[in-house]
Image (tube, rainbow, N blue to C red):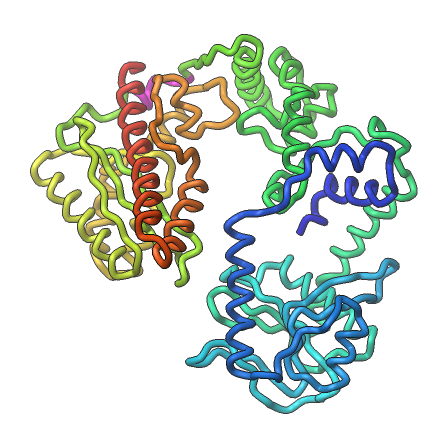
Amino acid sequence: MRSKCSHCTRLSVSRELETPGLKELLDEFYKKPESLAIRFGIKFETALETELKANLGDLDLAPESRELQATIDLMNKGIPVIYQGVLKGGSASMAFSGRPDFLLRGDYRFEFGESGLTAVQSSGDPSRYSAWDAKLSATPKPEYQNQVALYVDVLKELGLEAEGEHGLILGSRTIASFNADTLISQMLPVRNEYLTQCERVMVNSAASLAELSPLICEASRYCDICEYPLLCQDTREKTNHLQLVAGITSANIESLQGVGVRTVRELAGFEGLTEKLSEEQIFKLSRQARLQQHTYDTGEHVFEVLDKAPLVLLPEPNEGNIFFDLEGFTFFDEPGGLEYLWGWSDAQGKFDYVWADSRVEEAKAFEFFMLDALDRQSKFPGAKIYHYANYEQTALKKLAQRTGLFREEVAMLLETGVLVDLYKTVKSSLVISQESYSIKKLENYYSFERSSSVKEAMGSMEYYDQYLLALEQDQSEAEMLKRQVIAYNQDDCASTLALYKWLVTLS
């Protein structure tokens, strides 16, 4: 996955080529890739291995060492399932080395039963093996398929590729299988592109750190699995890089750099044209850069009213208004995640919440919230449900579909404009001098002070994960973690109320 980032490729290859000073720099900024997604991916893989061991016993083994021969020895013994084997080689100009989660003997197939994942004997060649990877994802993404294809390519070169299908064991507890030739044919162009990048770096090897500049990633969607996101952020800040500009895209940056605009400061004063950006696009990006540069220079948080119309259209204050924030846990044991904390403040700032740790409790929380919302519509005509960004609306629609409850009522709330997304109001009416338009950044403008120690939405999921673990071991610790997440949610609700009040003053 990281191979799609040319920055990661350049750094990795240059590190192996021992570019002077690079290893020391990377060591300084090294950050072990660690996230809930990674942890739960490992947890899922471990659960599958545990199920296989329980179902197959000594028919499921791992090699004794990380040498290719140790894995081949298990193949020669005819072990039906080899866990975390080692494969090296392949058809490329560079040898590939990898560890498929499972190698399955050719006369076996995977299936899910009452006792979880197992392998059952079927037709096929017992001297050959298919490659399988476990992925927590509900879908077999192309990059996952390419990973399996690399394993299949090695098996093919070793003369050990099974004739049956290879594939992925997904977090939805389904099996996605693919023909070997199909996997390899779609992998080859991607691998060739990566190898070309590597060869380019080797041929034009850098003699110094200066020749490697800029040490910054242009594909930030890979930063959560990278080892060096801190290096990129440090470089952005030190070089006043265009990536700091809120809402800018890589295509925008490329177009601006083509006419010599390389920093936020330069963009702030830019009045020219580029080949691919319209005058309106340049004007908007330049204005955003100007405000941000002002904050960088002075520390003062400033904003401009872009369009008063969305502010004027904000509904009048209503006694029945609520300010709603929903916390979800993506890595719940069942597909679709869990909406575990429903919090809302009323127009006077009084906070209410409902907590859920299971599908049954989630449905009850959904029902409680909807009955309260509908009651408010009856008692306070024109009352609104304010939230920030689209998560809450999406979750309500998902839950109505999943539970079969309140489908018409949710549709009515959405269609009649009862749910009001203040993010849309902000984006259509204001320009702020921040690198993002998250509600945390907006709090600089209405002087809201948070009381919770949890600072970000992903942080609340981390706390909820710790809470689930503590439930089994330490009830007092679990209760403390629960209270911290509730405090975070209460802060979000109070901040949404404060944001609404501030936006009304601007109309």
Quadrant for residue 262, please give it: top right
Q: Could you tell me which residue is drawn at 79 percent across and 70 percent down?
A: 68
User: Image point 33% across, 23% down: which residue?
Assistant: 310
* Residue 381: in magenta span: no
Residue 467 or residue 249, whichever sits in front? 467
Give the camera-side residue of 46 and 373: 46
Q: How many marks?
A: 0
- Above or below, 433 against 494 in this view is above
Question: Over which residues does the magenta segment extend?
Answer: 306-311
Q: Quadrant of the C terminus?
A: top left
The vertical placement of 425 against 265, above or below, is: below
Residue shown at 18% from the left, 28% from the top: 347
Residue 142 in the image: state x and y as whole percent: 62, 59
Q: Give the residue furthest to the left.
A: 379
Q: Could you tell whether 60 is left or right of 354 in the image? A: right
**Residue 475 vertical placement versus 63 (above, below):** above
Residue at x 58%, y 66% (from the top left corner): 134
Position of 400 relative to 412 (above/below): below
Q: Residue furthest bottom?
A: 123
Residue 138: give x, y in percent of width and height. 49, 62
* Horizontal and vertical percent position of residue 30: 68, 38
57 to the left or right of 160: left
Q: Quadrant of residue 235?
A: top right
